[in-house]
Image: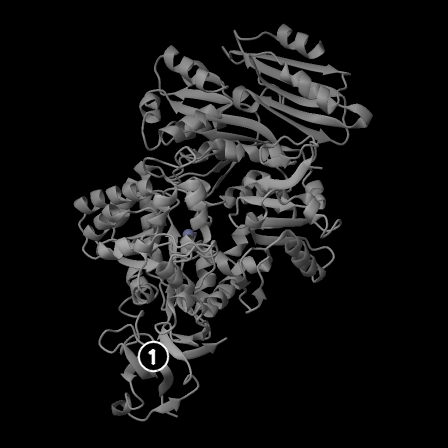
Amino acid sequence: MKPRLPLAVVSGYLGAGKTTLINRLLSEPHGLRLLVMVNDFGAINIDADLLAEAGDDTMTLTNGCVCCTMGADLYMAIGDVLDRDTRPDYLVIEASGIADPARIAQVAMAEPDLVYGGIATVVDGQTYASLVADPLIGAQIERQTSVADLVLISKLDHPDPALTLRLGVQSRAAVVDLAERNALAPLLFGGAPRTIPMVKGQAHAPYVTWSSSSPIQLDHEALLAKLNTRPAGLFRFKGFVAGPSGRGWEVHCVGPAVSVKPISQAQGTKVVGIGLEGQINPEQIENWWLD
Amino acid sequence: MSDIVVYSAKKIITMDVNRPEATHVAVRNGEVLAVGDARCADQWGTVTHDDSLKDAVLMPGFIEAHAHMMAGAMWEYAYAGFHDRIDPDGKLWPGLTDIDAVIGGLSDYAQGLDDDAPLVGWGFDPIFLKTERLSKKHLDQISTTKPIAILYSNLHLMCVNSVALEMAGFDHTTNAEGVIKGPDGTPTGELQEMAAMFPVMRRLNIDFRGLSQKETSIRAYADVSRRAGVTTVTDLYSEMEEEDVATMLRVTGEDSYPLRIVPALGAMSGPKAIADKAEALAKRSTDKLRLGAVKLMTDGAIQGWTARIKSPGYVGGQPNGIWNTPPEVIFQLVEELNSRGIQMHIHVNGDEAAEVALNAIEAALRKHPWMGHRHVLQHCQMMGRDLFTRAADMGLCCNIFANHIYYFGDQHVAMTIGVDRAERMDGARSAIDAGVNIAIHSDAPVTPMAPLFTAWCAVNRQTTSGRTLGHAQQITVQEALFAITLGAAYTLKLDREIGSIQTGKRADFTVLGDDPTKVDPMALKDVPVLGTVFGGRVHLL
Ligand SMILES: [Zn+2]
């Protein structure tokens, strides 16, 4: 059986810096084969050299459908990727500037062959306040941040604590200023993917990582209950958890979102966690998980 | 045999003021040579008389100025709607008006399927289900071995049976928003929105892309159109991939293909790219495939509370709708396309969306004045006299969604915009009085393609419940017939060639069993369509 494909949605209004973010991700040494799907108006500015270098791939999509009632094309394209002989390691969907990213990300909750990689919404720190006050488009922009699991502030020379606070109140997401991070892949894709070693030795990578292998067994209810008490500051948590009678669960938590899917043959319980430095330490994660 | 054929008819309604009625029309090389009596073409030489249509009433071939090619291809699946509908092959699918009829009708259909084929239905409309919702328990009565998926008419919902739930891995542990669960914690079978419908669609091989691109879809579209008396139809949001264009050129190019298609390229990329593509497509136009126009989306749909509407908003207090194209991009697209001389069809359901579109066009026309652009606002459902007047001032056409009054009018009164605004919605009277050239449309497959039914809606404004919604906006039969012929031709810039039966125009006729100008206006929708004549070729049903 092919491994499940994690899907992350990058959203944000026109000009917020979605493409810049994706180009940054492509250039980081995360060792993942990405497939970037772009669903937007205007020219595609994904850096072709970066794509080629990493053996990554890109697909552009349109909004073609009957009066936009379904937006079916995007989902059909996801189906095509799932049907490939070799799936990429991660699917990143660059949503259109006015898309509701939650509508797209929900497919990763529903489709058994996908796993939920979260919604990252990029916010232009200079224009956000005036955009959300716009009587025509404001509410739609605000929704993009309120459904996000991760809000990334772009285009500020210095972090703006007031904006960070505002976005933190408005959404349940972790709020991060892009200028303060030099490695983004851990935030977007999580700590240690299945086969690829964790990128180590990043200068000033301000992340806390933790992993655990244990004989823990949890049934569905117990697992959900456990996840509901995970410590604040544990931004990503993922892995495989053994359940009763040889079955088990694939778990992905991103910010406030929780996705649990069944696996038919569990091979022990192996999980990883990642958080933002200063907000959590490995002991706290360990204490929670083994408690 | 002479190359001039003179057709006789019980009556010919020409829509040409110079000779509103006639009994004979002469055709040569697919073109109208003369209109009048039996001797109308005598001065042109020897003629052949053809009396095969002598008992019929002829009108100019109807023009459906807003529909989608999917209208033909939906019939690959079982129809499960509330209203009677006729498929491209002429088979009547009686409306399924209670839950037993749905179960019975679909069970019969399932008998005809291969053992391993899924049962897929479409068009389901739960208006008769007052207290419960359609669920797997209903569909399991049809089959417990075959996967079943029934799409609702709004295309946002689906109900599936237990087999399909199992195939998609949906059970009590599923936590996806659109997978609805019952009190027992298991999925009820109802799936809301594409994200939740997708896992089932993927496993049942339901692919909506194929529906509007396959050769069979292009042929089915012609069948649907012919049954409705339509000889020119639009496909108002087409992707126009190279492969699709090639297939469309080939199929429509066949002599026996009885339909002219006017696709509008969907504006789904940047302004310059879309203008370049439209220009390139325009050069490849043929008689039966007219390329070069562009369709812009703006807001959503009123019945889904996604249309952008002005104060005081939705009666239930729902938040204002959504933009499918951001207003600033609408301005950029409109400016570029207008400056390049490309005609636009702009989707506007809510009045705020209409206003933004009008503002964008006004700004574009101030920069690049263009007499005769004939850009078209599509749907125009909430435009009042003020907005129609602005449209007239700028030379815009309005294509009004008249069928909405019948299919959704009651719902708009009760649930979306309330009675006073519902009574003036799809206001054809205001538009005509403001001096706008109008067309009226079905938006098939959203509602069935049938221009006489659409005309009936604009004339009578009756809803499904039988209520007359806004007497003041009713138009006359003559005005409605104009809107489905010459008015619609004008919005497509084809009024030089089609829209009336007069010398020099294409010999495209609708063949009717009765005279729509003589029947009771309430019977307009019941005037039988017997077929079409396309370019002088007779295509009876
Ligand atoms: Zn439409």
Q: Quadrant of the N terminus of chain A?
A: top right
Q: Which chain carries label 1?
A: B
A243 displayed left or right of B431: right
- Viewer-proximal residue, B54 or A163? B54
- Disc 1: CA contacts within 10 A as few (<14), some (14-19) or many (>=20): many
Looking at the picture, how far across and down is residue A62, in whole percent? 44, 44
What residue is rendered at 54% in x and 26% in y?
A118
Measuring 33% from the left and 64% from the top, which residue is drawn there? B480
Quadrant of the rendering where the C terminus of chain A is positioned: top right
Element assignment for label 1 = strand
Residue at image mark 1: B12
Q: Where is residue A266 in the image (x, y as percent from the top left)?
A: 76, 26
Examine the rendered structure and indicate whether residue B175 appears above or below residue B527.
above
How many numbered marks appear?
1
The colour scheme used to paint the residues is one colour
Residue A289 found in image quarter: top right
Three-letter code for the amino acid on which mark 1 is drawn: Ile
Q: Is residue A256 shown above or below B123?
A: above
Percent coordinates x, y for residue A143 in the rendering: 44, 28
Report which quarter residue B284 is drawn in. Answer: bottom left
Give above or below for B311 relative to B107.
above
Q: Against B29, is B476 above or below?
A: above
Side of B467 relative to A247 (left or right): left
Residue at point 23%, 73% (across, down): B17
